[in-house]
Image: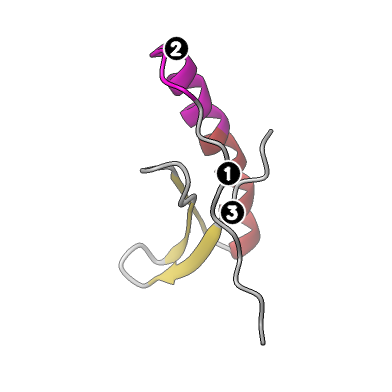
Amino acid sequence: MQPYLVEIFWSPEDEGYIATVPDLPGCCAWGATEFEALRETQDAIAAWIEACRKSGEPVPIPVTKTRQAA
């Protein structure tokens, strides 16, 4: 699987952590902990890519990079 950037943040509304994948629009997952959200994201990425392939759309290449601390 491609190394997509995953961003994780606390959501008071959802009372848990949300993990999003910027290179895959709409690809996200929820978890009670940051680790759980990250783990769930792996299934979400796989499903997103499978749906993309089934529809004949190209699978995006990871382009989002993390910012390095100065």
Q: Is residue 21 above or below residue 46?
A: below
Q: Any magenta on residue 62?
A: no
12 shown above or below 51: below
Residue 11: where, in percent of width, then height?
39, 68
The label shown at residue 32 is: none
Q: Position of residue 41 (x, y in %)?
A: 56, 45
Secondary structure of the residue carrying tag 3 is: loop
Q: Position of residue 66 (x, y in %)?
A: 61, 65
Distance of label 3 from label 1 (alpha carbons):
7 Å
Magenta region:
46-58
Closer to the camera in the image, 66 or 12: 66
As measured in the structure, the alpha-carbon distance from the residue carrying label 3 to the one carrying label 2 is: 23 Å
What amino acid is labelled 3 in the image?
A: Leu
Q: Which residue does the numbered mark 2 point to in the structure image? A: 54
* Amino acid at circle 2: Lys
- Mark 2 is surrounded, within 10 Å at the Cα level, by few (under 14), some (14 to 19) or many (20 or more) other residues, namely few
Quarter residue 56 falls in:
top left
Give the image quarter of residue 70: bottom right
Count all numbered tags in the image, as a single digit: 3
Q: Residue at x 48, y 68 (%)?
A: 9
- The residue shown at (43%, 42%) is 27
| Amino acid of disc 1 | Pro
Q: Main secondary structure of the magenta part?
A: helix
| Of marks 3 and 1, the one in the foreground | 1
User: Mark 3 — residue?
Assistant: 5
Residue 62's label in the rendered image is 1
